[in-house]
């Protein structure tokens, strides 16, 4: 694995963990390492201590290593396969965003940065959480590809987001969460 990718993922994971975007043992983060490979966190990692032992590099073709990968690995794979601009992907559960997703169908920020950068947040309603784990593998990449946004806020679930730049991805998440926090207060 590329050491610079490990360091980048480790640094941003710690920051996102401190902002309560990741919990203990939930969430996922990955980076495309080559045309047909990506690095993703393993199952049950602590996001405040990501290191090379917490990550695994997967080929697009599944092999035994997939058994160690986070449960979101299939979703990450489909996003990488279908969206060329995706270099980094994460799944987070920022509490204010999840809370707003339960209350609204669409979130319109009232703060300056939210209005300037986000404008409007459409909430995706999966309707049936019983089958969500099977459907999400296809619905999330399809939604991201079809819509003109690099993120998907899923009602009662969290945010899937991708970007070419890891810092931009984290900044967008932060703006979304801060806007939702302001709306909640």
Image (spheres, rainbow, N blue to C red):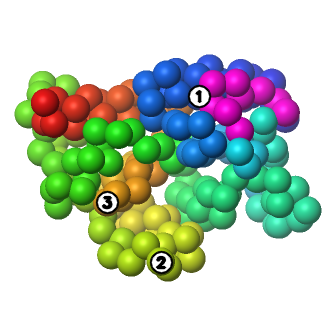
Alpha-carbon distance for marks 3 and 1? 23 Å
Work out whether 76 lies above or below 97.
Answer: below
Tell whether position 2 is magenta: no
**Residue 170, x across and y down, in percent:** 45, 30
Alpha-carbon distance for marks 3 and 2? 14 Å
Residue shown at 63%/31% (left/top)? 47
Q: Which mark is residue 155?
A: 3
Which is the main secondary structure of the residues drawn in magenta?
A: loop
Alpha-carbon distance for marks 1 and 2? 29 Å
Q: Please report contact status of discs 1 and 2: CB closer than 8 Å, yes or no.
A: no
Mark 3 surroundings: few (<14), some (14-19) or many (≥20) residues within 10 A:
many
Asked if residue 35 shows in the view, the reply is no
Q: Which residues are magenta?
A: 45-53
Mark 2 or mark 1, which is nearer the start of the sequence?
1
> Based on the displayed image, in which of its 4 quarters is residue 116 positioned?
top left
Q: Quadrant of the C terminus?
A: top left
Residue shown at 45%/35% (left/top)? 21
Q: Would residue 51 appear left or right of 158 to someone viewing this image?
A: right
**Residue 34, x across and y down, in percent:** 76, 45
Tell us which disc is closer to us: 3 or 2.
2
Q: Which mark is residue 132?
A: none
Q: Which residue is mark 2?
A: 130
Q: Relative to the observer, which residue lies in front, 161 or 154?
A: 154
Q: Would residue 169 appear left or right of 174 to someone viewing this image?
A: right
Q: Which residue is mark 1?
A: 13
> Based on the displayed image, in which of its 4 quarters is residue 72 positioned?
bottom right
**Residue 2, x across and y down, in percent:** 81, 30
Mark 2 or mark 3, which is nearer the start of the sequence?
2
Q: Quadrant of the N terminus?
A: top right
**Callout 3: helix, strand or loop?**
loop
């Amino acid at each position: 694995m590329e050491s610079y990718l490990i360091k980048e993922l480790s640094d941003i994971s710690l920051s996102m963990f401190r902002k309560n975007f990741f919990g203990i043992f939930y969430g996922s983060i990955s980076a495309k390492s080559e045309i047909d490979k990506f690095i993703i966190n393993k199952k049950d990692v602590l996001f405040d201590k990501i290191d090379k032992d917490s990550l695994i590099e997967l080929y697009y073709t599944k092999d035994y290593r997939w058994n160690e990968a986070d449960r979101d690995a299939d979703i990450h794979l489909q996003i990488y396969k279908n969206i060329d601009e995706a270099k980094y992907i994460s799944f987070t559960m920022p509490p204010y965003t999840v809370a707003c997703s339960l209350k609204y169908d669409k979130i319109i920020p009232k703060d300056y940065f939210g209005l300037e950068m986000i404008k409007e947040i459409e909430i995706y309603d999966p309707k049936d959480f019983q089958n969500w784990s099977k459907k999400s593998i296809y619905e999330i990449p399809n939604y991201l590809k079809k819509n003109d946004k690099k993120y998907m806020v899923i009602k009662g679930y969290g945010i899937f987001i991708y970007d070419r730049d890891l810092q931009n991805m984290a900044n967008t998440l932060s703006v979304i969460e801060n806007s939702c926090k302001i709306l909640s207060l």
